[in-house]
Image: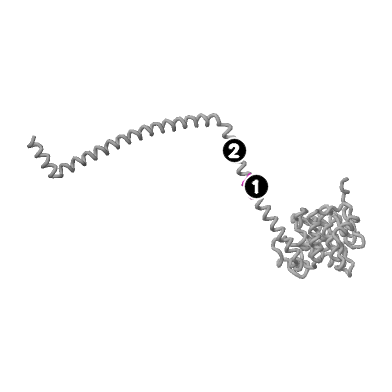
Amino acid sequence: MTDPLPTTMNKLPGERIYVGSLFAIREPNSLQEAGITHILTLLDTSFRPPPTYETVTLKQHVGPESHSQHDSNLLPISETFSSQDPDSKLVPTHLVIPLHDYPTSPLLPYLADATSYIRQALASNNNTGTVLVHCTMGRSRSCAVAAAYLISISDSDNRLTVQDALLKIKKARPSMNVSSGFVKQLEIWRSIGCPSTRARLEASEGYQKWKRGKEEKRQKRAEKDRADKRTAKRLSQRDMEGYVNEKDMKHWKKEGELVEKAIEKLDGQLGGALKRNTEIAARERANQLNRRHSDRKMDDPSQVHQSGSTVEAA
């Protein structure tokens, strides 16, 4: 059974919160009819407000702390005023959180800011504010943030479970399909007590453990990528060598046989030459010894006198 096609936006029962898709902010009349005062966008960094919206960037960020003090690896959050009609009394405040729709995307670091923004939005206009939380299709990111808010406002002694929060959203928006990675991060969010600021979030042991695990996985993936590249390079070289060997096998075999014969011939020549050189050296050594012995006889007078007496006697 296929998932039902998502409608533009759906209202959560008992809440002034709508969950919807990107198409919702392209329907200003529907926003006004729903009384939307605040919009929370969860899209990647390529998102830009519709061209019919007049956008003015605010100087301050959501929450008491500046985002520049936090994790530099996270993308900055931008807050804007957007209005389809500059003369309209309804000018929704627009917060954009850069978040990709991947199971491994870092949802947890933004939950404190997102839920704080929703609380401020609902408390605006004498507690009459209404919020639209949307992503591209309104199935995963927006529903995950809405679930995080529902968990955060539940009794701290009896926290709403992640599954119960998602079930509540599922009833309002049947097309909901939150990724498994976001569900795991919601479990961590619930376990650390749903901190109201990012500073408290980042100071929690649960967040630090999640962050260390994410960094370890990143390093393992990087090492695996490097190993895969090395393996691919070796396989490429081996395939190339195999191709050349197969192509020139006969030629190389013939060349090898010729080289072996040349080596055998050279060994024979060297062996014969070595034998001849050894014999010549032995004869030269014998001649040297004979000459040295003769020279000693000539230098000894007794041997010379004895030789002379022998001659006279003869």
- Crowding at label 1, few (<14), some or many (≥20) Cα neighbours within 10 Å? few
Residue 185: name its quadrant.
Answer: bottom right
Which is nearer the eye, 104 or 46?
Answer: 104
Query: Residue flagged by tag 1: what amino acid is it?
Result: Asp
Q: Quadrant of the N terminus?
A: top right
Q: Residue furthest front?
A: 313
Reply yes or no: does residue 293 show up in magenta: no
Vertical position of residue 27 compared to residue 71: above or below: above
Reply yes or no: does residue 227 show up in magenta: yes
Q: Is residue 192 left or right of residue 272?
A: right
Q: Which mark is residue 240?
A: 2
Residue 5 percent across, percent down from the top left: 87, 49
Point 58% across, 31% down: residue: 247
Vertical position of residue 111 compared to residue 139: above or below: below
Q: Is residue 49 left or right of residue 274?
A: right
Does residue 256 show up? yes
Secondary structure, magenta segment, majority class: helix
Query: Residue flagged by tag 2: what amino acid is it?
Result: Met
Residue 245 percent across, percent down from the top left: 57, 34
Does residue 29 show up? no
Distance between the alpha carbons at the discs numbered 2 and 1: 18 Å
Which region shows up in magenta? 225-231
Which is nearer the eye, 155 or 82?
Answer: 155
Q: Secondary structure at mark 2?
A: helix
Colour scheme in the image?
one colour
Residue 283 percent across, percent down from the top left: 27, 35
Q: Mark 2 or mark 1, which has the lower sequence index?
A: 1
Residue pointed to by mark 1:
228
